[in-house]
């Protein structure tokens, strides 16, 4: 099989995922349209993850251990964050099911892989690899803390995890796409510099989105229930 075929398939599926992302994001939250396009988006992300397999097997770096580990790590992060967005809504009335054994296993896996990727990036002096490590370190660390959190969860913990996933996936579906699009428009290979800029820009945008949506929906960054006085001061309304 020609390597161009899985590349084109991956690009086509990724482009469809971006389209579904924006249709879902711009639709009325909680509406039938929002839910339907959201399901389509998360399903498309699973296809994106599966399409990475042929790229690994047929690519020029197929037998490069560092390359394979990084791709497996990013694929697992994509699956994990997408799962958080899906199950947070589906199991919002059952926090113990949400943070069950699968939640803990994935948290541990992406955290450990994130550390490996970070160390690898520092050792090789590859800034882009260091940047990629943030997903496993941030999401994995937050998941492990939530999994064994003794405090009572925030009443809207589920929406917090959903927003974390949706905003984090903004970086996942736009970072590489924008870098590739820039190189295509420039008509030349620009190295890692453009990818670094696009990754940092989309990460910053994702954080800004999370803060904004959290403010609009009264969903703080923390997952434990605040004290009554703190909740009143912050103006949180538990609905």
Image (cartoon, rainbow, N blue to C red):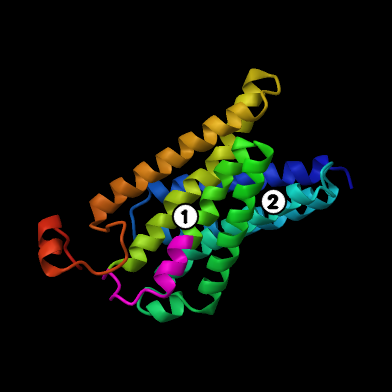
In the displayed structure, 127 sits above or below 189; it is below
Task: Using the rendered view, name the quadrant where residue 15 is placed.
Answer: top right
Residue for badge 1: 138
Whether the magenta-drawn stretch holds residue 147 is answered as: yes
Does 200 sit left or right of 185 as displayed?
A: left
Label whose residue precedes the other's in the sequence (2 or 1): 2
Does 140 sit left or right of 112 as displayed?
A: left
The residue lying toward the viewer, choosing from 100 and 188, is 100
The residue lying toward the viewer, choosing from 66 and 86, is 66
Mark 2 or mark 1: which is in front? 1
Mark 1, other Cα within 10 Å: few <14 / some 14–19 / many ≥20? some
Q: Which mark is residue 71?
A: 2
Does 53 sit left or right of 192 as displayed?
A: right
At a point 59% along the width and 46% down the height, the residue shown is 16
* Residue 182, position as x, y percentages in the image: 60, 26
In the displayed structure, 151 sits above or below 193; it is below
* Residue 238, position as x, y percentages in the image: 19, 67
Q: What residue span does the magenta drawing correspond to? A: 141-155
Whether the magenta-drawn stretch holds residue 165 is answered as: no
Q: How many marks?
A: 2
* Residue 107, position as x, y percentages in the image: 53, 66
SS class of the residue under badge 1? helix
């Amino acid at each position: 099989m020609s390597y161009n075929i899985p590349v084109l398939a991956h690009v086509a599926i990724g482009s469809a995922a971006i389209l579904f992302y924006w249709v879902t994001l711009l639709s009325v939250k909680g509406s039938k349209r929002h839910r339907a396009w959201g399901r389509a988006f998360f399903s498309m992300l699973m296809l994106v993850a599966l399409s990475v397999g042929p790229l690994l097997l047929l690519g020029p770096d197929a037998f490069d251990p560092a390359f394979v580990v990084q791709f497996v790590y990013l694929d697992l992060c994509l699956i994990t964050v997408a799962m958080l967005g899906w199950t947070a809504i589906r199991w919002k009335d059952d926090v113990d099911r949400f943070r069950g054994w699968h939640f803990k296993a994935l948290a541990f896996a992406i955290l450990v892989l994130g550390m490996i990727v970070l160390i690898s990036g520092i050792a090789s002096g590859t800034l882009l690899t260091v940047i990629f490590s943030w997903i496993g370190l941030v999401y994995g660390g937050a998941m492990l803390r939530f999994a064994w959190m003794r405090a009572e969860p925030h009443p809207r913990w589920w929406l917090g995890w959903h927003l974390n996933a949706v905003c984090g996936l903004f970086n996942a579906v736009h970072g590489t796409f924008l870098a590739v699009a820039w190189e295509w428009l420039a008509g030349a290979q620009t190295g890692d510099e453009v990818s670094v800029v696009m990754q940092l820009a989309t990460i910053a945008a994702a954080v800004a989105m999370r803060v904004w949506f959290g403010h609009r929906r009264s969903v703080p960054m923390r997952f434990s229930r605040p004290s009554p006085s703190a909740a009143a001061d912050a103006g949180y309304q538990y609905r």
